[in-house]
Image (tube, helix red, strand yellow):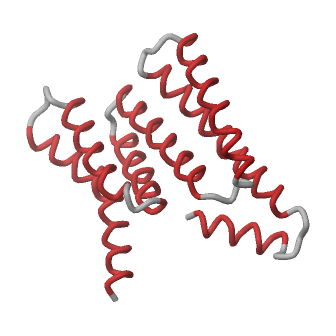
Amino acid sequence: LTHILNAIVFAVFGLEAPYVKLIFLALTFLLDTIGILLLYSAACRFNIPRAISFLTVLFFSFVIIPFEIWRFGNHYDHHTLFFTMIYVYAISRLYSDTNFKNIVFISLVGALLVAQSSMNSYVVPVVSVLVVVLLNRKQEGPDIIRKTGIILAGPVLVCLIIAGKNYF
C-alpha cells in the first residue's frame, strides 16, 4: 500500500517536483495525526482514564515526529503505524459492541493491515480470533465460529491473493 500511496503522489505532482518530499511529509503527518486521534479514541473506549490516554498519546506523537522528518515521510513504517492504529480502533469498537458491522469493519481493517506488511499476515488472524473468542466466551459455539469466520475472511483472502501472486 505504501507504493500505491507514493505512486499517487508522483502521478498528481510529478516526479521532478522540488517539493515532492514535503508532500510526502505532509501526507505522513496527516496519517499520523489521524492515527493518534484514533488511538486516543480507542484508549477511551477501553475505559482508560482520559488524562492517562491523553498523556500516552501525546508521548507517542512526540516519539514518531523525529522519525517522520528523518525519513521525509516516504518510509513504509508510518503507513504500517497508521493501519495498526486503525486496527486497534476497530478492536476497541468490537470491545464496545460485538455487532455485525463492527465484525465486518475489523475484517476489512485487518485485510488492509495484512496488505501493508507481511508480518501482519501472522499477527492479525491470531489477534482477531483471540479477541472474538475472549469477547464472546459466554455465547454459544456456532455464533463464535460464525463471527470468527467473518473476521478471518478479509485477512485470509488478502494472504491468499499475495501468496498466489508470489507463487505464479
Q: Is residue 57 above or below residue 159?
A: above
Split into 4 quadrants, where in the image is the C terminus? bottom left
Q: Is residue 5 left or right of residue 114?
A: right
Q: Quadrant of residue 127?
A: top left
Q: Is residue 133 above or below residue 109?
A: above
Which residue lies at the image location 54% right of the left edge and 46% below the top edge?
Answer: 81
Is 2 displayed left or right of 24 in the figure?
left
- Image position of 100 with respect to 117: above or below: above
Q: Residue at x 22, y 53 (%)?
A: 149
Residue 25: image x %, image y %?
76, 52
Residue at horizontal 71%, vertical 69%? Answer: 8
State the residue in front, 123 or 153: 123
The outermost residue toward the right is 18
Q: Quadrant of the N terminus?
A: bottom right
**Front-most of residues 60 and 103:** 60
Is 118 drawn above or below residue 168 in the view shown?
above
Q: Nearest the camera: 144 or 84? A: 84
Extreme left residue here? 141
